[in-house]
Amino acid sequence: MQNSSNQAEQRSSHAADFAKAATKLYRNARREALTVAAVWFICLLWVVGYCYLRGYAHPPESWLVQSGWACGPGDGFETLWGIPRWIVFGILLPWLLASAFTVWFGLFGMPDDELGGEGGNGE
């Protein structure tokens, strides 16, 4: 009788440890997913917004042109290193920053979580 109660206690302790580890794993995975989604969304807003404002000629009466946010029809496209400036700052720079963030986040921002043992006996 004593032996079966010890086994039941061990099973409940193991189940509690598993639940705690699963909760931690879920929390970390959720945080990582939200971080990646937020960075992706920020990059999306920057790329689409900047390329829309600087990559196309807008009507001169547009408030975007009058306030200096967008390029007008008379504005020529400036180049940087032989590449149009809107491509450098609207596509190349965000791509490089996102790649650097990906490397940093993969190396330092994601903790290693214990995924459990490799036992055939349910451990």
Image (cartoon, rainbow, N blue to C red):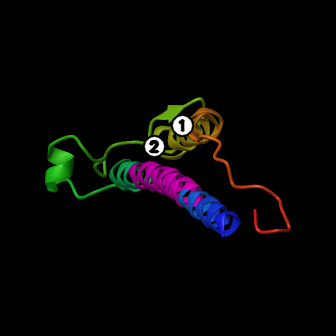
Q: Dominant secondary structure of the magenta stretch?
A: helix
Q: Which amino acid does label 2 sit on?
A: Trp
Q: Name the residue under label 1.
A: 97
> Residue at position x 77%, y 55% from top?
117
* Most foreground residue, 46 or 28: 28
Q: Give the range drawn in magenta.
A: 17-42
- Residue 33 on the magenta span: yes
Q: Is residue 122 left or right of residue 105?
A: right
Q: In this view, does 68 lie to the left or right of 57?
A: left
Q: In which quarter of the image is residue 120?
A: bottom right
Q: Mark 2 points at which residue?
A: 86
Q: What residue type is labelled 1?
A: Leu
Query: What kind of element bears circle 1?
Result: helix
Quarter placement of the N terminus: bottom right
> Residue at position x 59%, y 29% from top?
81
- The Cα–Cα distance between marks 1 and 2, rounded to whole angstroms, is 16 Å
- Residue 101 on the magenta span: no
Who comes first in sequence, dot 1 or dot 2? 2
Are the residues flagged by discs 1 and 2 in contact, CB closer than 8 Å? Answer: no
> Residue at position x 15%, y 42% from top?
67
Look at the image and tell me whether residue 56 can be seen.
no
